[in-house]
């Protein structure tokens, strides 16, 4: 099968575009109209063999994970996902059926979250398979990382730690609906990919104020695997949780908890206070010794 044959087969599986898609897939670029009054969001994430998935991971699960990684970024902005563009770089040993199944997994996930794949690129080279997906979305008011203030509370969705042994990193649910709901509450928000501690530090660093963050150690929900709970170290640094952490004003805590419409666990896990950019637990033990043990592509 040639590259053109592969793309022709792929295009035949794509749904008909919506009315805002003015140039569909198959041309030099796709084109779409932005929705009046909405901010256009754009994000990009990669999926690399040996880094984000193992070689024996089923290809449909790999394709879905790539899209869900991007969906988690849209969720962190309180946004609505719209369109995606996919780039594939596979080695010569990659079976054609594996690549077809990878795309099918991505398309199945796209249908679930109402995302349209509108273009991309296909190449082959030595080395591990690598994929990159760019997603667009929209939001009436994107929630940034920079809004936390003194006295705000830190909340979180879901559970933390043991993402790889439990295979949560493959089978997670991006918090799209939760993020849209939280756009009415959150002053700052981020999705957790590199570990609770490292991504919490990013919220602190982005704040317009100099803050500390006190984490309520006993209130952070641990993920379980084979009837064992994640340790505090694993909660802080394992990463690939794909949950949301966000700051809200303390006077809206009861309103948030009483109006939360999802089965997804919601937990108050910390409080922001004036300070010097430190994170500590409720026993005032500084946690910065762990900061570099979150995931960092240039140190891991």
Image (tube, grey):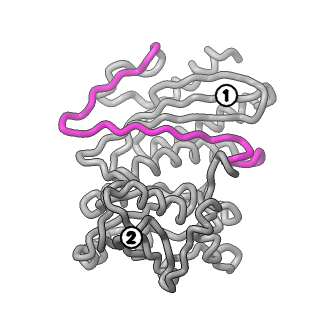
Quarter of the image that includes the N terminus: top right
> Looking at the image, is mark 2 or mark 1 earlier in the sequence?
1
Return the residue nearer the eye: 252 or 211.
Answer: 211
Q: Mark 2 points at which residue?
A: 275
Residue 32 falls in image quadrant: top left
Residue 69 location, x and y as percent? Answer: 53, 48
x and y percentages locating residue 286 in the rendered image: 54, 75
Q: x, y percentage for residue 40?
A: 31, 36
Give above or below for 17 relative to 149: above
Is residue 30 one of those drawn in magenta?
A: yes
The span picked out in magenta is 27-56
Give the Cα separation between the discs numbered 2 and 1: 46 Å
> Quick check: 256 left or right of 285?
left
- In this view, the residue farthest toward the left is 37
In front: 118, or 233?
233
Disc 2 residue crowd, few under 14, some 14–19, many 20+, Cα 10 Å: few
């Amino acid at each position: 099968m040639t590259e053109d044959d592969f793309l022709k087969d792929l295009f035949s599986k794509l749904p008909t575009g919506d009315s805002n898609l003015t140039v569909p897939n198959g041309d030099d670029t796709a084109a779409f109209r932005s929705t009046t009054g909405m901010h256009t969001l754009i994000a990009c994430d990669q999926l690399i063999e040996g880094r984000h998935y193992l070689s024996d991971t089923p290809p449909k699960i790999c394709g879905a994970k790539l899209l869900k990684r991007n969906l988690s970024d849209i969720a962190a902005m309180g946004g609505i996902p719209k369109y995606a563009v996919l780039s594939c770089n596979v080695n010569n040993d990659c079976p054609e059926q594996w690549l077809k199944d990878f795309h099918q997994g991505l398309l199945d996930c796209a249908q679930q979250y109402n995302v349209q794949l509108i273009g991309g690129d296909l190449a082959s080279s030595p080395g591990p398979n690598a994929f990159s997906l760019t997603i667009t979305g929209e939001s009436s008011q994107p929630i940034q990382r920079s809004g936390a203030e003194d006295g705000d509370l830190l909340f979180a969705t879901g559970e933390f730690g043991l993402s790889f042994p439990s295979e949560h990193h493959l089978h997670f649910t991006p918090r799209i609906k939760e993020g849209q709901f939280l756009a009415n509450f959150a002053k700052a928000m981020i999705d957790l990919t590199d570990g609770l501690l490292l991504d919490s530090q990013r919220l602190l660093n982005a704040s317009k104020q100099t803050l500390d963050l006190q984490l309520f150690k006993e209130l952070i929900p641990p993920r379980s695997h084979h009837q064992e709970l994640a340790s505090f170290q694993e909660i802080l640094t394992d990463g690939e949780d794909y949950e949301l952490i966000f700051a809200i004003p303390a006077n809206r805590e009861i309103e948030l908890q009483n109006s939360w419409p999802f089965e997804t666990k919601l937990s108050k896990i910390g409080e922001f206070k004036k300070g010097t950019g430190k994170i500590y637990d409720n026993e005032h033990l500084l946690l910065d010794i762990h900061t570099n043990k979150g995931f960092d592509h240039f140190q891991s």
